[in-house]
Image (cartoon, coloured by chain):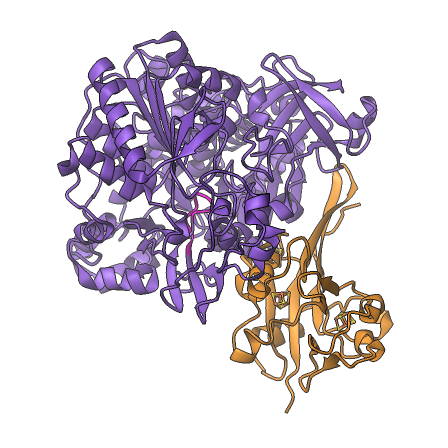
Amino acid sequence: MPKQYRLLYDENLCIGCQACSVACRVENSVPDNFFRLQVHVQTKGVFPNLGMSYERLSCMMCENPPCVSVCPTHASFQSKDGLVHIDEKTCITCKYCILACPYHARFVNPLKNVVEKCTFCYDTRVSKELLPACVSTCPTEALSFGDMRQKGSLVEQKSQKEVLVFPKAHLGTKPKVAFIPSRKGVKV
Amino acid sequence: MAYLQARRDFLKIATTGVATTVVIPGSLGALGEVALKSEDKFIRSICEMCSSRCPMEARVVNGKTVLLQGNPFAKEMGTSLCAKGVAGASQLYDTQRLVKPLIRLGKRGENKWREASWEEALSLVAGRLSALRERYGARSVIFSAKTGEQYDLLRSFASAFGSPNVFSHWSSCPIAIESAFEHTFGEKLHRDFENANYILNFGHNLFEGLDIPLTKAMAHFSANPSKKLVVLDPRFSVIASKANEWHPINPGSDLAFVLALLHVWIRDAKYDKKFVEQYTIGFEALAQSVKETTPQWQQTLTGIDAKVVERIAEEIYAASPKCIIDWGHKATTTKAEYQRSRAILIANILMGNVEREGGIYFAKTAERINAFAKEMIVPVLNDPYPRPLVNEKRLDGAGEEGSANRFVSKRHGSLTAIPEAILAQTPYEIKGWFLTRHNPLVTVAHPQKMKEAMEQLEFIVVNDIYLSDTAMMADVVLPEATYLERDEGISKIAFKTPCYAMRNRIVEPLHQNRSAIEIVRELAERMGFGSHFVWRTVAELRAFQAKGDSVLLETLLRRGVASFDVPELFARESVFVERFCERHPKCNSLLDSNGLLSSMLTQLKTPSGKIEIFCKTVEKAFKGYGVPSAVDMDVKQGYPYVLTSGKSAVHTNGHTQNIPYLNMLMSDNPIWMNPLTAKEHGLKQGDTFYLKNGISKEKGTVFITEGIRPDTLFAYMGFGRDAPMMKRTHGKGMNPSKLLSLQSATLCGAMITNVGVEILKA
Ligand code: SF4
Ligand code: SF4
Ligand code: SF4
């Protein structure tokens, strides 16, 4: 049975501290000044009626990935478990996938000259039953990750309890990354 | 590009191009290839990217990838770690860090160096320090270090040397709250954020000044809809964004708000009378002192509506004792800081939340737990850093009867007193300074004056990772090993239960770096007082500390932390007391008539043994200070704006700004300004302008944001470096310390970090 991975990002717990982003860089040797993952924090509203938005920017691991369908060499592909990967050896750096991805998740790694993005740390961690580096590191446990078929797991329980938002849902990409929106928005 | 490649596989430093791009003498970049030997698959240690000292672990796979994360054996940590901690390897392999001792060529501060061997550097340091002692007396040499084991070590060395002049970073950070605690409870207490229902927070931004266990507890607290968090801060900080209520209070006026709270509770007789009667002294003096501090009165000072104070007073009272009025971490912001901190502690006391679940509690140290159990359930450690008493006056008068700093801890001193003492050579001649991992030219007020003073000194030795602003002023720079390369002694952690932690090295030191322990031990030997330390190596130090307890040592080597099966204990919670007594029946004989352990609150280290709301000795020396009162509240000093400063989640004080991974996230500190203010001064986003006051005129870049009061400005600290060898930070941003005066906060000697300024167009 293929796994149904989900990564949950709880905006209520996120403090924008970037520990996840640095952990990702270390784990995956992400080249300087490029990011597989960033969390953007922005102040909204007019003083003194303010709120902050927290947004995770990374590959969403779409179930219907536009990056895969445009790839001419099949370097971008979907695994049995529904994860989207890039085969570095077949990637010809044509950048079609970069243009196709609505989440701006991909970039060209200048050191290797291939396209790269978040992999859910599949090779180094998830395939070895470890949590993705970002999830493991987060100081506030804002991130949870797991197989949705596992009843009672944190990610399954939270998914049941909370209202989930799937970014740009209208595009029909069906992301595997879901957001729990902040309950403390701008007070107007 | 050289360091880009180094990042690719950070266990190796690429050699190609290094010589052409990095020419810093003594730095890692100037060396050839460095291959590392990792020692295990999991190594557990202690982080050092800030002072929180979080337990952490390194995962080393195939001797290649290292991911630092939290140490799951420390249960409050789990695998969590902050960005700074995770970036440890980026500091370790930074081509700009120092790896060889440097000896000054040319004039002091001129930044001309030659590399030296450890042999030469250490014999020079030992010789010069001994000569200063011979010529001017041991007191002529200052010793300073950041807080933690390094400071204990240096303090021990200083007292063997014979100098009373030891300084920690306390007076530039937590000294106000530390002295408030000492005078109120005789020691510091902790906050049970996990179980509280209501928290009133005065700008303690645990979401940007991270301390993982506390940050995590606070995050879960604020995300819980059934709990209430109220934040008072002139800036819309991250924690403010997570609060139920945020009040943009006038900067520096927290004291007025707390005094009004106290007023309301006493006026309405809504406070824990039984608690106050049984455990405290001096309530009458407080009642007298807050008679006039009404919600109406505070309104003009804080800008917060009187009705809000009334409502909050009511709400907290209803939530007590599961409520916390948070005193924060760094409290050196205004002249009245001591009073503000005392007022907050006393507000907690009136709510009766002491030794209650969800309130505040005494650290359950090994000694305390053993005393209540009446048996040794937790091993007690030896002190490896002896401190023979030095019978000399300190240069800052700390602890000296009659001095303005008489209540300042002799152990930590007041850093802002140093420049004057050196320049005026009063109370006596000061000729030398030994700094270990301490960078006062960035982190202490008025570095311009400090630099002038340093220029007068005959000898300065700095132990650091980088050639920092302060290191540039040295005669000898000793390249310290980073925390990932160091073995250290055992440190104590005591919150609800006692725990020990130990720093274990994760990789062999890169080239020639040495730890402060090795450096100081070696110097003591060369200077003829090697016998002062009974241990010779870190292994011996640890064994001595653990009293030969091999089980404890092995646990600490393997797990990085050692905790003990001790039940949590709140002295005034019957459930907890019963559980404890069940396990340790000898404790029964200590119970009071209510079945509680009230002796924990009645045998304090204060003069009366009780909680002191009024301090007689303090009042005698500083009128109006014996009890919280409305004193010293002017922050702006006649200027239209207040400049405030604070931490970001990705940097620590003056320590991390040059670390590649962290510099990539934040490399500059534009000054926060409200759009209305910017408009008034004709400033657009990114414009440069000047901040000016009686101390200095400093150039800044404007960051226009709604998230700040129109009369307040804010800067993240640690930027505006003069040191050209820290290439990523050199000349970026502004150093807010340059606008701070050397006047310190009344009584506690704290550096004042809220300062009045005006805005001038560039
Ligand atoms: S580590 Fe966690 S809290 Fe920090 S930015 Fe990432 S998701 Fe948010
Ligand atoms: S987020 Fe972008 S890169 Fe990731 S699967 Fe979807 S389309 Fe592809
Ligand atoms: S799952 Fe791994 S690769 Fe993806 S963002 Fe998290 S740390 Fe980076």
Residue B424, image quadrant: top left
* Residue B521 on image: x %, y %: 23, 40
Judge whether B645 appears above or below A111 on screen. Answer: above
Would you say B572 lies left or right of B697 here? left
Q: Position of residue B529 (x, y in %)?
A: 16, 33
Whole-percent x, y for residue B242 in the image: 64, 49
What x and y, as percent, mark residue B583? 23, 64
Magenta residues (range): B48-55
Judging from the image, what is the letter of the chain drawn in orange? A
Residue B542, placed above or below residue A99:
above
Q: Is residue A31 visible?
A: yes
Is B255 magenta? The answer is no
Quadrant of the drawing holding the C terminus of chain B: top right
Residue A17 shows in the view: no
Quarter-of-image position of residue A71: bottom right
The quadrant of the picture showing ligand 2 is bottom right
* In magenta stretch: residue B49: yes
Picture residue at 66% right of the left edge, 82% below the top: A4
Rendered residue at 32%/34% (across/down): B121
Closest to the observer: B693 or B211? Answer: B693
Residue appearing at x 17%, y 50% in the figure: B544
Q: Most prominent secondary structure in the magenta stretch?
A: loop
Of the pair B29 and B501, the residue shown nearer to us: B29
Instruction: Give the number of marks.
Output: 0
Chain B representation colour: purple
